[in-house]
Image (cartoon, rainbow, N blue to C red):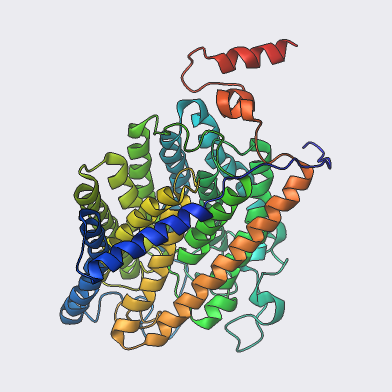
Amino acid sequence: MSKLTIHQKPKHKRRRSSHSFSRSVSSLWQHVVNLAVGKPSEQSKKTLRRLVLAFGLPLVAITLFHLLTGLLIDPAVAQDAAAPAAAEPPKMDTGDTAWVLTSAALVLFMTPGLAFFYGGLVRSRNVLNTMMMSLVAMAIVGVTWVLWGYSLAFDVTLAEGQTFAQGIQQFVGGLGWLGLNGVAADAPDPIGYAATIPHQVFMVYQMMFAIITVALVSGAIVERISFKAFFWFIVLWSTFIYSPLAHMVWGRGLLGAMGALDFAGGTVVHISSGVSALVAAWVLGPRKDWMSKPVIPHNVPFVLLGVGILWMGWFGFNGGSALSAGSLATVAFVATTVSASAAGLAWLVAEWLLKGKPTAVGMGSGFVAGLVGITPAAGFVTPLSAIAIGALTGLACFFAVNLKAKLQFDDSLDTFPVHGVGGTVGAILTGVFATKAVNAAGNNGLLYGNAGQLVTQIIAVLIAAIIAAVGTFIILKVLGLFMELRVKPEVEDEGLDIYEHGEGAYGEEIRGEIAFAKTIDQ
């Protein structure tokens, strides 16, 4: 491991988007005024149609699905967590163990899927570097999670009669499980996270979430961040952002004590990675040729392959979060499927209506948006509510992606519009659609008479976003004291694959390979 050296970081000019944002808001306001005074132009009518699609249809969908879920809900959908206390404590179960081990493998498989998804979206000269930024998370977090990450996320000391932590352990776990000390392979955890599976199974399942979460951040900063900087970013971010957030939500910490519902990672995974991606893109600035050259995906089949792998892995992501092979896992599995389908359909129709052509990348992005949106709600909502959440999240992410383009903000692969916005919408809608009829261990949401749950979800979203934003900013600024965050301009021109890794993706001889070979000879 090379020694870090202090040096003065040169200032990079960043293109500001404030003027563009002001023009967009002013233009939208003018269209609204034209409609109000009865003098609509064609552009104003087009804007009205977009506003109706963006806001009117979701409101209709919420009302419709509320009625349907109220009429058709089965009060015995998933009662794993609601079963009366047994006369004897639960025992280790081989079926539950097998399901969670399988789910852990599925979640790990999502990271290579993400590599294909991201890799297909970039230019061919950067595909290996982009995929490496996902795969290296498997290497780093797979080690740090064992050494200290798991302990910081889930080790907690509870006094007799306490359910949630007190003091500093409201925010971060303890050090008792460093190096997996006391984490048994033949007994469940002593806290009560998962009573029917070995402690090490729970640990390795949670490891897979930590791996893919930090890999998601890379999508906003590909084609310009140095691999060395991202390597150290993974180490610091997974330690100081991911582990505390996981502890606060799932490790008997602050957000769990507040009653925030996050079945599989809306706040912990998607809001944290999406907001961090937004901050990282702002700190690094746009790519050198951003807005001066068309940047189009170099391999759409890679993108679709990645979407398929992600969707498959998401069954372990959401279904495995039940931590048992029962009806609750079934609820999450079904919700995952129908939400993704609804979001892909909503994105496809919106793109078709507003842009004239449905695209493969658009539909794939819609599927991912639906998977993101249902993640916090998967174990708390009915199938019909899952369809509503998917459709609403798909539309929200579609408009977020288009707004980002208008604001000319260089989040390279739309990480914030899909994961940040999608995770936020999903977490908030969990507070709308959640029902104890599905999972008695959860809570009722707004549509089932509990407006307070919606408020709790919004507070949890804000806390997660602030922690991710502030933490990411500090980490990048500290790293900037020790190394260049960006590659040199000529490396951006030639491609990061050759200069950062010494290899090309497709074997063709390009100018960058020749230049790299000359540097080796010298």
Residue 334 makes an appearance in the image: no
Residue 366 makes an appearance in the image: yes
Q: Can you give x and y, in whole percent of width and height, for residue 9 in the image?
A: 76, 42
> In the figure, 50 relative to 124: above or below?
below
Q: Can you give x and y, in whole percent of width and height, for residue 97 in the image?
A: 45, 60
Front one among 408 and 151: 408
Q: Can you give x and y, in whole percent of width and height, for residue 341 in the image?
A: 25, 55
> In the figure, 112 relative to 103: above or below?
above
Identity of the residue drawn at 64% across and 36% down: 226
Identity of the residue drawn at 66% across and 70% down: 172
Q: Can you give x and y, in whole percent of width and height, for residue 151 in the image?
A: 66, 63
Quadrant where the image shows the N terminus = top right
Left or right for 499, reference 175: left
In which quarter of the view is residue 15 placed?
A: top right
In which quarter of the view is residue 161 placed?
A: bottom right
Front one among 405 and 133: 405
